């Protein structure tokens, strides 16, 4: 029954996506333009008017796609169904390009980029060919033929920016991450947001530059650039939107983002100005094409704010020798998540505004009441947290003072697909070990519970700069010390130190950690996770209905009060229509958020008693009494791992079995592993996770 339901939902998703895609392909054609005018004329005689028609045709299909997608993901989560491994999908997911500047590009990504570029070319060609056939230069500017062509090319660049803008926000949705339908997680899809943002701002800049160039030739810059027209394009609004977009893009450049994260973080909030003035510039007819992404993004943002309330308190913290800390947080026992999931946290004592993402290091199959994250001190925010946790209290009474924390998430895949492989090769660099800690605990839980599907062999390659970084393996010491099962092997590479110690000696030396317990009597709330996906689908539907009803009310009032004695209808300024669209959207979001607040409050109140009456065990392994031999594990000093040799040896040991290769670490390590897999004669499946230094981890999933 469940499989049949999933199949039906897949077919429905395919139909909805095909409809939405077809709209974009048909929109530039003259046939569609003619049919659309006829449809608008008919809609103008109804309460829906042209804007209701635009919402129903251009916006709602994608919102319906999102709603069906949420239902599909919820059903998949309940059935715990793993994605089947298919040869075609595996081949397309292989890394094709491994380049220092382009990074790692899979076959799927190259194919999608090619199709998107083809679509942009088609859109530009269809529009510009029609424009050149008409050849009707603007009378007010008195343009020559070549000047008219330059202006039209610049105008059509604006349409290409609009196409990129329609997809721009979809990759960074978290709770409403529709990319999860394709098995792509938030950490992975961020790179698509960067690509789309760069392409969009390029076309928008060409659009603005071409327009200014044409104005400049005719000495109309002063007349046009400050113009706020009552109807048509509002040039001043477009200039403000372009300035905001450029500010966002410039502060998002890698050098600024890594060195001055606060500037990047706060400047990104200019998106409110950007989208508002884009609406006034492009008008509501164009806005409905990009509205689905904005609709879901704003709704997702409000739901995430609600989800992070109320705050909880840190149960305990462990301080590692390598200036890293492990925070243990309370969670609802019903909250489950897949390994390598991430959460966003905010520490009000450090900043009331900044959220940072971290990989969860615990497993919900093992720790039912708590979840943990490991944070290394590598930036301003993480340094402040490390100092706050590790600082000695002024008085003995302050030792267990509550440290409030807001939690958002966890976000992860719908199923633990890594369990389907016969063997796993895990490659970690530095703090990149964190997602593998949860994976190893999940594998140990699967083996101990007698689950049929789990990897039979696991090889962990861990590269660190100094031996003290090995202390981050502390959460999985139980698995490393369990020599009887003989499924897990560890190879440590210390790149900047020399020595002759064994793995056991190193672990004994660095695994003594300091544990700090906090008083949680002032907070009885736990982390409850994201809302049920079925409720999310219902909230999207409710918000859509409220917005459409408000549009109908606006159309009715405009027609009723705007009718003149002569029988003619008063023309409403375009900015007034845009402003009402904006207000309708805000009201719809507020109403939907109120429903989400009620659901959250009921859930928190229901779970409060169970949490407050449940003692939570936060004991962690200390590493005392480690066997110094541990001959099955290896440690190497003074060099980096030779991945080609490692892969060759591991492939020989796992002859005839499927191998999953997971990489998490610096960009150079990730590229080295991908290149080695690409050049290898055997087929490996590679899932890569990229870390954004000093802040959070980002994954890039690709198969080999």
Image (spheres, rainbow, N blue to C red):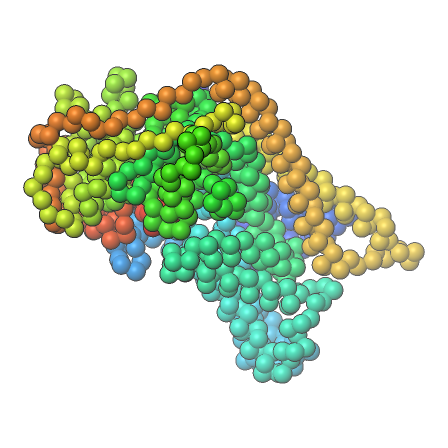
Res 322 → quadrant: top left
Identify the residue at image location x=30%, y=60%: 101
Identify the residue at image location x=25%, y=28%: 622
Task: Provide residue 31's location: percent of width, then percent of height.
Answer: 59, 56
Relative height, residue 499 to residue 327 (above, below) = below
User: In this view of the protein, which residue sits in the foreground, 671 or 470?
Assistant: 470
Q: Answer whether residue 158 is visible to the viewer in this image.
A: no
Task: Provide residue 528's location: percent of width, then percent of height.
Answer: 49, 28
Relative height, residue 286 to residue 589 (above, below) = below
User: In this view of the protein, which residue sits in the foreground, 670 or 83?
Assistant: 670
Query: Looking at the figure, which quarter contains the N terminus?
Result: top left
Task: Provide residue 281's location: percent of width, then percent of height.
Answer: 63, 62
Q: For this view, does 663 lie left or right of residue 312?
A: left
Q: Answer whether residue 216 is visible to the viewer in this image.
A: yes
Relative height, residue 447 to residue 378 (above, below) = above
- How many numbered circles are shown? 0
Q: For this view, does 46 lie left or right of residue 199?
A: right
The outermost residue toward the right is: 565
Query: Looking at the figure, which quarter contains the C terminus?
Result: top left
The outermost residue toward the front is: 395
Task: Provide residue 674's location: percent of width, then percent of height.
Answer: 23, 48
Res 416 → quadrant: top left
User: In this view of the protein, which residue sits in the foreground, 12 or 195?
Assistant: 195
Identify the residue at image location x=53%, y=73%: 209
Res 431 → quadrant: top left
Q: For this view, does 292 lie left or right of residue 80?
A: right
Identify the residue at image location x=38%, y=58%: 259
């Amino acid at each position: 029954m469940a499989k049949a339901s999933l199949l039906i939902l897949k077919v429905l998703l395919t139909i909805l996506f095909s409809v939405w895609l077809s709209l974009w392909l048909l929109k530039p054609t003259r046939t569609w333009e003619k049919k659309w005018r006829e449809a608008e004329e008919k809609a103008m005689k109804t309460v829906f008017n042209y804007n209701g028609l635009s919402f129903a045709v251009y916006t709602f299909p994608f919102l319906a796609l999102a709603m069906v997608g949420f239902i599909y993901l919820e059903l998949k989560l309940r059935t715990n169904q793993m994605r089947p491994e298919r040869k075609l999908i595996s081949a397309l997911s292989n890394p094709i390009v491994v380049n220092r500047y382009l990074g790692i590009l899979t076959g799927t990504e190259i194919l999608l980029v090619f199709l998107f570029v083809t679509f942009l070319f088609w859109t530009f060609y269809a529009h510009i060919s029609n424009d050149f056939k008409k050849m009707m230069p603007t009378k007010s500017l008195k343009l020559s033929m070549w000047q008219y062509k330059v202006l039209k090319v610049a105008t059509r660049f604006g349409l290409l920016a609009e196409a990129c803008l329609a997809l721009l926000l979809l990759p960074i949705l978290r709770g409403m991450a529709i990319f999860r339908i394709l098995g792509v997680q938030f950490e992975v899809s961020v790179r698509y947001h960067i690509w789309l943002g760069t392409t969009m701002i390029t076309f928008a800049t060409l659009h603005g530059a071409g327009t200014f160039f044409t104005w400049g030739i005719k000495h109309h810059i002063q007349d046009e650039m400050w113009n706020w027209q009552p109807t048509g394009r509002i040039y001043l609004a477009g200039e403000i939107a372009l300035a905001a977009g450029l500010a966002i893009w410039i502060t998002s450049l890698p050098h600024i983002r890594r060195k001055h994260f606060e500037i990047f973080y706060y400047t990104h909030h200019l998106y409110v100005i950007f989208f508002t003035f884009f609406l006034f510039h492009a008008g509501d007819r164009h806005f409905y094409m990009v509205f689905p992404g904005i609709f879901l993004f704003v709704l997702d943002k409000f739901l995430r704010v609600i989800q992070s309330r109320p705050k909880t308190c840190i149960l305990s913290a462990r301080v590692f020798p390598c200036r890293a800390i492990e925070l243990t947080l309370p969670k609802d026992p019903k909250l489950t998540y897949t390994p390598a999931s991430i959460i966003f946290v905010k520490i009000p004592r450090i900043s009331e505004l900044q959220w940072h993402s971290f990989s969860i290091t615990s497993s919900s199959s093992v720790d039912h009441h708590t979840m943990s994250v490991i944070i290394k001190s590598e930036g301003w925010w993480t340094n402040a947290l490390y100092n706050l946790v590790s600082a000695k209290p002024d008085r003995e009474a302050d030792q267990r003072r509550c440290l409030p924390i807001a939690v958002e998430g966890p976000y992860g895949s719908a199923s633990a697909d890594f369990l389907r492989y016969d063997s796993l090769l895990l490659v970690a660099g530095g703090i990149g070990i964190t997602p593998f800690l949860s994976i190893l605990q999940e594998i140990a839980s699967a083996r101990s519970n007698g689950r049929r599907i789990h990897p039979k062999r696991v090889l962990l390659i861990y590269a660190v700069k100094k031996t003290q970084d090995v202390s981050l393996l502390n959460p999985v010491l139980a698995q490393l010390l369990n020599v009887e099962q003989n499924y897990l092997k560890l190879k440590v590479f210390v790149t900047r130190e020399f020595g002759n110690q064994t793995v056991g000696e190193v672990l004994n030396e660095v695994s003594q950690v300091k544990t700090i317990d906090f008083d949680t009597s002032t907070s009885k709330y736990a982390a409850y996770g994201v809302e049920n996906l079925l409720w999310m689908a219902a909230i999207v539907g409710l918000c859509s209905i409220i917005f459409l009803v408000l549009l109908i009310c606006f159309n009715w009032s405009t027609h009723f009060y705007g009718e003149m004695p002569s029988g003619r209808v008063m023309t409403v300024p375009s900015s007034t229509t845009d402003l009402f669209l904006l207000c309708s959207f805000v009201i719809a979001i507020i109403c939907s958020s109120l429903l989400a607040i009620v659901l959250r409050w009921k859930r928190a109140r229901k779970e409060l008693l169970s949490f407050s009456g449940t003692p939570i065990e936060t004991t962690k392994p200390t590493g005392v009494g480690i066997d110094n031999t541990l001959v099955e594990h290896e440690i190497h000093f003074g060099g980096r791992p030779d991945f080609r040799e490692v892969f060759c040896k591991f492939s020989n040991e796992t002859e005839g079995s499927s191998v999953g290769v997971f990489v998490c670490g610096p960009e150079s390590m990730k590229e080295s592993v991908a290149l080695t897999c690409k050049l290898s004669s055997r087929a490996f499946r590679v899932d890569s996770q990229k870390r954004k230094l000093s802040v959070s981890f980002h994954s890039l999933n690709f198969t080999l």
